[in-house]
Amino acid sequence: MSRCSAGRRAELAARDAVAVLSANFRSAPEILDAVNAVFAPRFGETFTPLRPGRELPRSEDPVIELLLTDAAAWDDETDPARPDLGALPGDKRWRHAEARLLAQRIADLVAAGEPPEDIVVLVRALGDLPAYERALEEQGLSVLASGGRGYWGRQVVRDLCGWLAALANPRDEAALFGVLASPLVGLSSDGLLHVAQAGRGRVWETIRGGDADARLADDDRDRLRRFAARFAHERTLAGRLAIDELLRRIIEAADYDLHVLRLPGGQRRLANVHKLLRLAAAQQGAGADLRAFVDHATAELDADAREGDAPVELSGSRAIRLMTIHAAKGLEFGIVCVADLGRELRRTVGAVLVDGDRVGLRLRTFDGTSEPALAHDAIKQDIVAAERAEEERIGYVALTRAERRLILSGGVKVDDWPNAHKPNASLLSWLGPALVPGIQSGLLDDAEPVRDVRVAGDGPRRPLVRCALNRPATVGRVLRPEHAAPAGRELPAARPLGMRPPAAAAPVTAPVPARVSFTQLADHRACGYRYYLRRILRLPEERADAVARDAAAQEPAGLEARLRGSIAHVLLEELDPARPGVWAPGGDPAARAALVRDMAAGWDAALDDEQAREIAGLVAGFAAAPLAARLAKARDVHREHPFAVGLGGDLLLSGVVDVLAVERGGALVVDYKTNRLEPGVDRAAYIDTAYGVQRDAYALAALRGGARRVTVAYVLLDRPAEPITFDVTSEGAADLETRLRVAAADLLAGRYEVTAAPHRALCQTCPGARGLCSYPRELLLRDTPGSVVG
């Protein structure tokens, strides 16, 4: 649909060719009455009043609310009665108070039975999204934010990318100070200042030499020394280890994953950490080194790349949406909360203005001031008028998204109401009085901070608006004390512990891990010697072509396997089997291929038509498979779900499952595999050999999580309708634990035996393949594994 100009509209109207759409099938009649009362005077004769498109009962209670936060009162630092508002992003205290009240109101609605997925919070600008997001999370509510700086701007991603940037170049002091201030190190503000003063352009050298130690408090000094030791050690390994391995090492050394899980929305944040590990592995698989990946991450951040957060739940349905008004165009929600209506516009008009044949200048005078010349003032007034009209249209869009309830929230100086005619006037400056007569003239006060008032106008149907005044003096009657700083009461803020220094050099005979992943167990089972070279000595993998150059001619051309798998996995993460969209049977092949190419672009990979169709076929095949239909019926579905399970003693086994579905009385675990198997291979035997440890770990973790029965399904995506399944009940938990402990026995004992069945898929990238391994090259490069006799 294209916008019609006023002239064109008049021309069409003269020919009786204009159809006016005034029926609204979305909103409650009270909301339509309020919209008409507010915008009819504003838009004048161009406004078409909205009428209900269907008969809906009218509510006896107000379905429209106006939450006014007194900016002047909350910003008054001399008021000793100002309550603590906790720690929210941003520096405007009144906005923190507004966010706390709005979060309290939404929490009350959810507690009263409103589905969280029916609620949206709309804001005018992206900058203040984090404050409202944090306030909602600290009420224990799940939030799905659309907007902001996207995935690459998430703090966990910036923390870890900052670490990589500092490793790549320790003279990148912006990255270095970011690491010091992050939970990876946790240096205090005073500590950062002392390091900066001591460093003065040589920060890493200053830290390494201990030149700042004398200025620091004991805790900061200890943190900085541990950082210096760890950072110097990791720098020696940076050129030899994979990028995702560098990230895993620092995450483990700083217990960063545990810190992230303690934060509000911890699972979502941790999913973003795991996504970064996958992106790093895929980028390196495509040929990127550490510096190239850091540059890629920086470019994506600077470009506001639209990389999405890692999904946590398949439907995302139990989360409150948080987005800009622009992003909500065309959408509708049961309850719409329009926040930050008190934000004044930031309008800057240039010194040179051009509008058609008109030119305007602002000329600098000798005394340093400036004067408008030519048509500058006239063009400026036109610009201001156009922007003001756009703001009014944006306000109209926001209010008309609501179906059942509309909540308006903003901060103003209540006792000194802003002038609605100022060029930078906020939406609330005129919308408040247009909705509620007298709101700008002391209608609400400390004695009566909550009132139900009829909407402005003189029509027969003037719905009630519940108005509330939020200021320190009304705390307890409007903003309840327990909601003013919920995080400060329920989740005491603690400085992260900082990273552990590297372990002192120890005999290489028996490094016993207390915490292992099933990936480590599977790697050790496949070949203890390869595990020893990679995990203990930290030797880098060989590139496949360096070992198998003589076999390269026989290798089929096509997309690199790791990249192919990464793209397919991310697309499957975003697939909702209940609403498959383009992936449903009969979906548009061109649209599917376009989605694949867009995803591949995140790895700087350009796919040809055949490659895009191949990956799209994998995803569409699963979407049409019976297992996808089973996921669609599950009670609750989580993706990229982390787990940890104890195996007795001090051994903790950890990992992440692709999909965990909670079913009636049980659980379904799904793992996607993009492996290409040769014709005739026994698929069940292959899964048992290659992924038996992983399968047992999945099953035991789900049983320990409370499921009475568990199905673990491995989906080989070339045949998605034929998953390899493993079923176990709670009675089998002891056997699973025994099998896992047996699988871990050699690793725990420090035994690193070479595999008895060398073959290309296992050996061609092994660090020992070019001379350290005891097997001859012809055995390392054979296609089929088989035991070596003698």
Image (tube, rainbow, N blue to C red):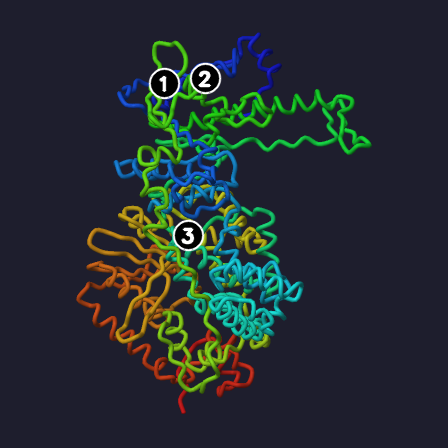
Asked if one can make out residue 481 in the rendered structure from this viewpoint, the answer is: yes
Looking at the rendered structure, the kind of residue marked 3 is Leu
The vertical placement of 292 against 692, above or below, is above
Q: Position of residue 730 (x, y in %)?
A: 19, 64
Q: Splitting the image into 4 quarters, where does residue 56 fall?
A: top left
Q: How many marks?
A: 3
Which label sits on residue 53? 1
Q: Is residue 185 left or right of residue 290?
A: left
The residue singled out by tag 3 in the image is 572
Q: Residue flagged by tag 1: what amino acid is it?
A: Gly
Q: Secondary structure at mark 3?
A: helix
| In front of the other: 289 or 479 | 479
- Where is residue 544? Give x, y as percent: 55, 72
Q: Earlier in the sequence, mark 1 or mark 2?
A: 2
Mark 2 lies on a secondary structure that is loop
Q: Tell me the kind of residue under disc 2.
A: Leu
Q: Residue furthest left?
A: 731
Q: Residues within 10 Å of mark 2 (few under 14, many from 20)?
A: few
Q: Which residue is mark 2?
A: 21
The residues tagged by marks 1 and 3 sit, at their Cα atoms, a distance apart of: 39 Å
Q: Earlier in the sequence, mark 1 or mark 3?
A: 1
- Residue located farthest toward the bottom when viewing the structure as drawn: 790
